[in-house]
Image (cartoon, rainbow, N blue to C red):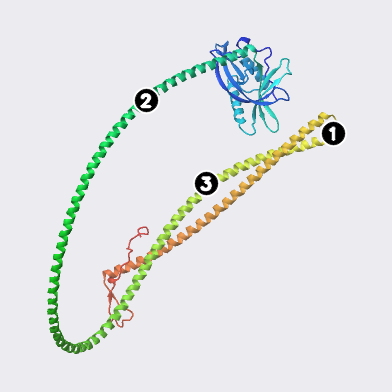
Amino acid sequence: MSKPFSWGIKSPINSTNYIGMRPAEADKVFEKLVPVQLQLSPTEERKHFLSLSVELMSSGISSTSFRKQDLQIEITDEDDPYIFYGLRMSEEDFSVLKSQQGLLIDFSSFPSKFIQLVERCISEYQTESPKFLILIRYQNEMPKPCFVFEIVETNPFKHLCHLSLKLTEGGETQIKKHLSLKLRQLKEEQENNVQVLKSLEQQVDIERKNHAQKTAELELLKCDFQAKLQDMQQLLKIEYQTEKQLLLQTKMDLEQQFRQHQMNAEEKEKSFLQQIKDLKEKNSQIENHAKEATSRLVKTEEDCNRLQQELSSARRRGASLDADFHSKERTVNQLRTKIAVLEQELKDKDVLLAKQQDLLTAAQEQKGRLTSIVEEKDSVISRRESAVKTMTEELIKANDIIRKLQNDIRILNQKVRLLLLLIKCDIHSSIFIQLKTRTDVAREQEKVLQHRDDEIARLRDELNGHSKLQDEVVELRSKNEEKESAMKNNEQIISYLNKQLNDLQLRSETTGRNPQWFSTPNDVNGVGPKIPMSSLRSSPLQLGQTLENR
């Protein structure tokens, strides 16, 4: 724990401007309630909230024509006015404090760092186990008793004191000045509150007057509303009477229209009865005509029998003609089936060509995807290889460090053996203490070696993962080569089919220029029917087309 800062003879503080004074040139930096742990005696310890204020006060002009500032720290309690501790520090005093406690900051940055530590203590106080504490303890070991202000960091091993300041307890005059300042502030606050209260009372009076005016206006509006309501009720009654009269008039008109429609319906019924009588007379006339038609039908049946005999003779002649027609029709059907077979073969070849083209496009797309995947994997492999190189370099360095540490451990073990021999010979206790420290160092070095071994195992696992990635890339490349060979085979098949189709197209064009006739296999000596080659369907592929156009 660092020593508390003591003023000694070097402190240039005057009793008139020490504590409780508020000159016009003071600049207040921090003022807040802070949780403090008080130790007034070895047995008495309690937690309390005290008010901490930090100010920068001018103390004249230095030799370099710059205005000098002193840091003033005051600790007070609002509940107990007799608790008053203070400290005023100049730049020379801070240099002494810096050399005593080994501080690494300048006087200009000390106030901000001090406030940061206090804020850390306030924030840590809200947690269950605070790490930073503010401790004020009474110290009567010195020639003059005083209070020590410490900022302590707690951990399971040790309590670390970051800063220790010696505070002086305020005298009677200083406490009186402090209380007079507090009383003056309270009076100023009271005067401000009285002024605010007066202004609020004036606003309340104004609001009351406005409320009275608004109530009078509301009563006037109520009277106007009631008068308008009565007028509206009278208007509604008049409109109701007029609407009632209109409804009665429309009712009478509708009844008259209904009677008129009823009379028209009776007249239409009489006319329909007359029409029915006329239709009955026409029905009797039609029956007479039917009897005459039956007599005519008998005569037509006799004519029909005669025509049926003539028809039977005509059918015999048609049967002989049908036999000749069927023989010729069979030959035509055979030729049509051959034509259909040829057309189906052409269609199948077209479909096969389209499928081969689809396979080619799909293979090209898959090739593009595989090339992109291979490029990505190559980039990943390059990155992983660079990482592996860096890891190997680090492993080499770690192995060198491990060898050095192992050599140090061997040397230490030899020294430990020698020290054990010395301990058996009852050597002085100081050598035994040094032995303990060296064994602790050896244990720490063994821990470091174990940590390095763990890192080496982790790096080896990462190298195994990189080797697996390389195997995956090799498999992808082999698959890509297989796909490329399949694409080459498909291209050869497509070129072969294109040659065949071009040969067929050339033959069809030559036969189209010189229309020839071909006969079916059933023809004997070319007697059967012949069909021109130009009547066959031409192939959709034309001569001179390239593979891309098809």
Q: Secondary structure at mark 3?
A: helix
Q: Residue at x 14, y 77 (%)?
A: 283
Q: Which residue is mark 1?
A: 423
Which residue is tagged 2? 212
Q: Earlier in the sequence, mark 3 or mark 1?
A: 3
Residue drawn at (33%, 28%) of the image: 217
Marks 2/1: CA–CA distance: 104 Å
> Which is more N-terminal, label 3 or label 2?
2
Instruction: Give the distance between the C-alpha atoms of the residues marked 3 and 1, in whole angstroms.
Output: 64 Å
Q: Is residue 250 above or below residue 2?
A: below
Side (left or right) of 456 relative to 258:
right
- Label 1 environment density (alpha carbons within 10 Å; few <14, some 14–19, many ≥20): some
**Residue 185 image point, x, y percent:** 54, 16
**Residue type, numbered disc 1:** Ile
Nearer to me, 157 or 352:
157
Q: Are marks 2 and 3 in contact (CB under 8 Å)?
A: no
User: In the image, what residue occupies the spot 42% across and 64% down?
Assistant: 493
The kind of residue on which mark 2 rests is: Ala
Q: Is residue 431 above or below residue 259?
A: above
The answer for how far apart the CA atoms under marks 2 and 3 are is 85 Å
